[in-house]
Image (tube, rainbow, N blue to C red):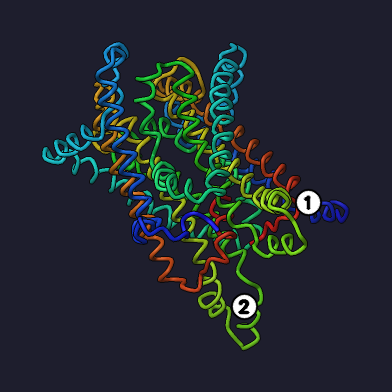
């Protein structure tokens, strides 16, 4: 027992996480099978797993995941490239910053999701309209974080490099870029969430495939278990991407102070 | 060093301030949009691609705004959306802050809740909207629930980080001078965590607005999201832009209000903390 206690204490957080997840699933299953017992309303984890296996074996799931992933990754990559580019431009040129700032602020705070129906009218039900919406969702967090990262670099570091005779380029590459990196990475991570919301909601409006389409189609037909499969997939996808980017962030900028 | 501070006798100083440039930028942008639209109407593409089905000129947006305002439609929809926002957001504050606090001060609570919180936080909660409609039907309550789900996690996580990052030496000072745990709580922890909590609220407003809109798209009889969907299905882009303008105005107003609140509650919060808080905000 003491050996087990030792292992438990050293890995307490992980043990507790596993226990918590199992407990949660068991409670959910019990509530479903003992209290509600209406598959139209609540479905337990067991039936969600069954629905998952069914969709997987029919090959439907792969098609939906593939569609959403394609929209997501294309829109996201274009958004990241444009966001970093414009962010650097705004950080380097004061004029560009003054001209672009009001527009960027407005767009960043606007619920761009509302434009989704218009994009679908303009670009059709296919992948183009979704990429556009994902792009708009992804671009602004990256842009803002790149800009903030580059303009809030510690002035003392810049002065130190200058005092030792560093050139402008050296300041840019040795101080500004590494200093901005952690915030840029944060922007990338934040964009994932917005881009996913963009992809899903644009599929709600009209699509032929995709996880968002799966969720609406299933819940309109009261196949709640299939809709929950979609939600669980999104949860796993979002979580994995989030944690992966967090890990890369630590690898790239280990000097950055994570605790505030 | 840079162009803006150089003496330029032709352009007076007030015209060169960044506020003026911002205003000019917005006005010029709108004028370009209008001219672009006017130009488009004169090309054959306008009819061919039926551009008026998805694009409106600023002037048309203003006209539509007037029409919707006069018919009372705009007020009715905005009021409905506002109610949903208020219910969902208040519930998120009432639930999020205590749970965040409990997670920060009690280790076990943190260990047990953390996997669920971080997993649901990374999920786009709007994906739950169709399922919530199936469960609870249409109306204000289920929509508020979607808003709650969108808003609660930023508030919870920022409260958690805010309390976690309370400066140790401040707590020690109060303790050394014989402060009770209650005094530590009210005089140190709450004030020191306030900027982070307000940042969480600010972040939550954005998510809540998106949740309001998405929830209304699915099923509702009123609300700005409903209005936008209704008209976009009829290929009338004007009301869509009106809806966006109203929501942007609401977003900016609540942002300014929270900034004021922050200045009022924690006036010591300065720019040196900005970067750290920014980090928090995006965490």
Residue B267 at least partly seen: yes
Q: Which residue is mark 2?
A: B170
- Relative to B121, is A124 above or below? above
Q: Nearer the viewer, mark 1 or mark 2?
A: 2
- Residue nearest the observer in this picture, A246 or B31: B31
Q: Which residue is mark 1?
A: A11
Residue at point 44%, 54% (across, down): B202
Chain bearing mark 2: B
> CA–CA distance between discs 1 and 2?
31 Å
- What element does badge 2 sit on? helix
Residue B117, position as x, y percentages in the image: 57, 47
Q: At 15% across and 41% down in the image, what residue appears?
A: B69
Q: Could you say which is closer to the camera, residue A213 or residue B30?
A: B30
Q: Is residue A34 visible?
A: no
Looking at the image, residue A150 sits to the left or right of residue B39; the answer is right
> Among all residues in the image, which is located at the extreme left?
B70
- Residue B20 located left or right of residue A137: left
- Residue at x-position 66% and y-position 49%: A182
- Residue A189 in the figure: left or right of residue B41: right
User: How many other residues sit within 10 Å of disc 1, few (<14), some (14-19) or many (≥20)?
Assistant: few
């Amino acid at each position: 027992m003491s050996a087990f206690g030792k292992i438990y204490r050293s890995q307490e957080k992980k043990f507790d996480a596993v226990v918590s997840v199992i407990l949660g699933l068991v409670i959910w299953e019990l509530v479903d099978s003992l209290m509600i017992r209406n598959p139209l309303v609540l479905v337990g984890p067991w039936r969600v797993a069954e629905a998952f296996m069914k969709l997987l074996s029919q090959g439907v799931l792969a098609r939906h995941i593939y569609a959403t992933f394609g929209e997501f990754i294309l829109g996201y990559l274009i958004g990241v490239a444009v966001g970093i580019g414009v962010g650097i431009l705004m950080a380097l040129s004061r004029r560009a910053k003054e001209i672009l700032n009001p527009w960027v602020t407005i767009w960043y705070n606007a619920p761009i999701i509302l434009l989704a129906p218009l994009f679908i009218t303009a670009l059709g039900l296919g992948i183009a309209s979704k990429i556009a919406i994902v792009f708009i969702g992804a671009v602004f967090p990256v842009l803002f974080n790149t800009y903030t990262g580059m303009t809030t670099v510690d002035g003392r570091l810049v002065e130190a490099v200058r005092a030792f005779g560093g050139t402008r380029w050296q300041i840019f590459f040795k101080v500004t870029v590494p200093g901005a990196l952690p915030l840029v990475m944060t922007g990338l991570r934040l964009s994932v969430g917005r881009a996913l919301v963009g992809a899903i909601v644009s599929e709600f409006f009209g699509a032929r495939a995709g996880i968002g389409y799966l969720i609406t189609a299933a819940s309109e037909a009261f196949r709640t278990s299939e809709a929950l499969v979609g939600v669980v997939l999104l949860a796993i996808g979002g979580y994995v991407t989030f944690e992966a980017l967090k890990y890369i962030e630590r690898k790239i900028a280990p000097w950055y102070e994570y605790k505030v | 060093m840079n162009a803006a501070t150089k003496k330029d006798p032709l352009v007076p100083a007030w015209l060169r301030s960044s506020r003026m440039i911002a205003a000019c930028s917005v006005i010029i942008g709108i004028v370009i949009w209008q001219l672009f639209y006017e130009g488009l109407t004169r090309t054959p593409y306008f009819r061919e691609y039926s551009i008026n089905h998805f694009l409106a000129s600023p002037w048309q947006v203003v006209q539509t705004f007037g029409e919707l305002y006069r018919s009372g439609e705009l007020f009715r929809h905005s009021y409905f959306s506002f109610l949903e926002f208020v219910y969902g957001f208040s519930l998120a504050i009432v639930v999020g802050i205590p749970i965040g606090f409990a997670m920060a001060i009690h280790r076990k609570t943190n260990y047990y809740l953390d996997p669920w919180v971080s997993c649901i936080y990374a999920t786009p909660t709007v994906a739950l909207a169709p399922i919530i409609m199936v469960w609870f039907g249409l109306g204000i309550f289920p929509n508020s629930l979607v808003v709650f789900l969108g808003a609660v996690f930023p508030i919870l996580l920022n409260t958690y980080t805010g309390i976690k990052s309370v400066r140790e030496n401040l707590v020690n000072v109060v303790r050394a001078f014989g402060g009770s745990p209650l005094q530590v709580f009210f005089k140190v922890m709450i004030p020191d965590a306030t900027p982070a909590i307000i940042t969480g609220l600010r972040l939550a407003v954005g998510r809540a607005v998106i949740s309001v809109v998405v929830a209304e798209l699915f099923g509702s009889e009123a609300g700005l999201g409903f209005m936008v969907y209704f008209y976009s299905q009829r290929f009338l882009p004007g009301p869509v832009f009106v809806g966006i303008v109203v929501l942007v105005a609401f977003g900016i107003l609540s942002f300014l209000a929270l900034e004021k609140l922050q200045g009022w509650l924690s006036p010591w919060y300065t720019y040196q903390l900005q970067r750290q808080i920014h980090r928090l905000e995006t965490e």
